[in-house]
Image (cartoon, rainbow, N blue to C red):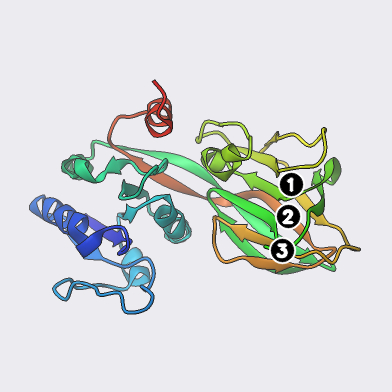
Amino acid sequence: MKVILSPNPYRDKGLRAVREAKRILEQDGVKVSICLPFRPEGNHEMPADVAFSDIRTEAAEADCLICFGGDGTILHSAKLAAEFHIPIMGVNMGSVGFMAELEHGELKLLHRLVEGNYSCEKRMLMEVRVLRDKRVIFQDLALNDATITKGAVARVLDLTVCGDQMKIMEFSGDGVIVSTPTGSTAYSMSAGGPIVEPTAENLIVTPICAHALQAKSFVLGAERVVEVHTSRQSRKVAYLSADGGRAFRLSGGDIVQLRKSRQQIELIRLSGRNFYEILSQKLGRN
């Protein structure tokens, strides 16, 4: 068995959790590679005694990918996991961590991975494209959501949201979120959207601070194609971001098209906790 350990060096200080996971897995005869999900910025010092490998090279032969960080670290690695068809698991080194399977104090449960005492949970991905004059000028994948928001100094945006080319809503506001069920507990929930069981397959449309009574959150079937139209006459600046990644600047008249991707990812489950237990724990409910 070959496992990639991928730490966020800003979360896992000194890579202490990764070192412990490596020790546990190697005791069970697992071949372990440590790969950074991204290059640290500035003069961030990395432990000199840790050997790092190239993550794409290792992913070609890996059986699973374990991320150490918050949900952002898992989101960053999800596209790689989908590309190489390897299951992924998160170890929470952050605060909330809805997608993480283990807390950093539960690393001993990694023995179950070697024993085969785990399951894989399929999650849908969303394809994100920007059309300008009927040409695709940007595309990405999202596990959580795609957000269209105003610039820092812009006034409200004028947006039209369509499902299968039929208008769902038209409003002025701060933007709109289109999320997967996995992303329903993230920004979409904070903006008033519904919580959807993450193994479902839906597209969830949630306006952000809409100046319209009829602009409510919609849950659409996964076979729908959602389009968000920016006003062609507007000179206001709008930005698109998939899973909180680098923002893409939209122009007036651009169409953001969102649909279920043919690709998917598998999240490893070995703690035995179900979604409702995780929800209660993370949101502090009794």
Q: Which residue is mark 2?
A: 257
Q: Estimate the x, y position of residue 259 in percent, counting from the top left.
A: 67, 49
Q: At label 2, which amino acid type do we have?
A: Gln
Name the kind of residue labelled 3 in the image.
Val
Q: Earlier in the sequence, mark 2 or mark 3?
A: 3
Q: Secondary structure at mark 3?
A: loop
Q: Label 1's element?
A: loop
Q: CA distance from mark 2 to mark 1?
A: 7 Å
Q: Are marks 2 and 1 in contact (CB under 8 Å)?
A: yes
From the image, tell me which residue sits under label 1: 225
Marked residue nearer the N-terminal end (2 or 1): 1
For label 1, the crowd category at 10 Å Cα-Cα, with few meaning under 14, some 14 to 19 and many 20 or more, is some
Q: Which residue is mark 3?
A: 153
Q: Quadrant of the rendered structure where residue 39 is?
A: bottom left
Horizontal side of 82 relative to 159 (left or right) equals left
Give the camera-side residue of 174 and 267. Answer: 174
